[in-house]
Amino acid sequence: MENKEYLSTRVVSQTGVSVSHCYQCGKCSAGCVLASDMDYPPSYIMRLLQTNRLENDQKVLSSAAIWICLNCENCIARCPQEVDIPKVMDYLREESLAVGCIHPQARPVVAFHQSFLDCVQKTGRLYEVGLILGFKLRTRRFMQDVKIAPSLFVKGKLHLLPEQIKNPKRMKAIFSKTIQQRNTEHQ
């Protein structure tokens, strides 16, 4: 019987992806365009999960690699075992947020994700000005990219008011349902 406290067991139950199928050929890491920027390449993340050691689970959840991953699917395309690493990375990001052990280097990425989701939840669409403001407030990078904003506005790339969807209540219901499911899974 599998121990539910290990991250690999939760990965299988939540995503259907068995990290034990990985036999460490390294093709995922060789094909990953960002592997050199990661603290742990994809194959090593899989190996850490396979060990079923709590300290390695902690390394995985607090790694920058899970946030740097673009989910481009090069890894699964190259994998002879078709291990769906992008799906695993998505789950690992959720877990990392849930337990609050985000790598300091990944904080801007998390800020961007949260700003994006906030905008979509409120307007049902991407609202660039809201996304930028949310990101700037979360990261305190107020002056970064400030010089390009006027030209984007003149070119019509930044709209001051958000475009609304027809049924905003439905969008809010989708977010509420997702949050409820996430809370249920983490209890």
Image: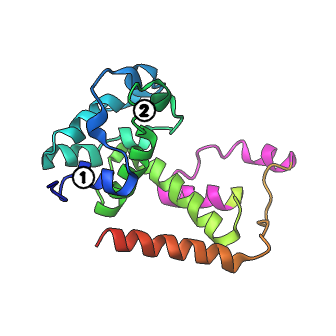
Does dot 1 land on a helix, a strand or a loop? helix
Image quadrant holding the C terminus, namely bottom left
Give the residues in magenta: 130-155
The label number, if any, that marks residue 82 in the structure image: 2
Q: Position of residue 172 (x, y in %)?
A: 61, 76
Q: CA distance from mark 1 to mark 2?
A: 18 Å
Question: How is the structure coloured here?
Answer: rainbow
Whether residue 185 is situated above or below residue 110 in the rendered picture: below
**Mark 2 packing: few (<14 Cα in 10 Å), some, or many (20+)?**
few
Whether residue 70 is situated above or below residue 123 in the rendered picture: above
Camera-side residue: 154 or 80?
80
User: In this rendering, does residue 140 appear at all?
Assistant: no
Count of picture labels: 2
Camera-side residue: 134 or 77?
77
Residue 144 magenta-highlighted: yes
Q: Residue furthest right?
A: 155
User: In this rendering, does residue 180 appear at all?
Assistant: yes
For the point 70% across and 42% down, which residue is it?
Answer: 147
**Mark 1 packing: few (<14 Cα in 10 Å), some, or many (20+)?**
some
| Left or right: 87 as drawn, with respect to 127 | left
Q: Position of residue 69 (x, y in %)?
A: 45, 38
- Amino acid identity at mark 1: Thr
- Amino acid identity at mark 2: Glu
Residue 84 placement: quadrant? top left
Instruction: First in sequence, mark 1 or 2: give its number.
Output: 1
Q: Residue furthest bottom?
A: 169
- According to the picture, the residue beneath numbered tag 1 turns out to be 9
Does dot 2 land on a helix, a strand or a loop? loop
The label number, if any, that marks residue 77 in the structure image: none
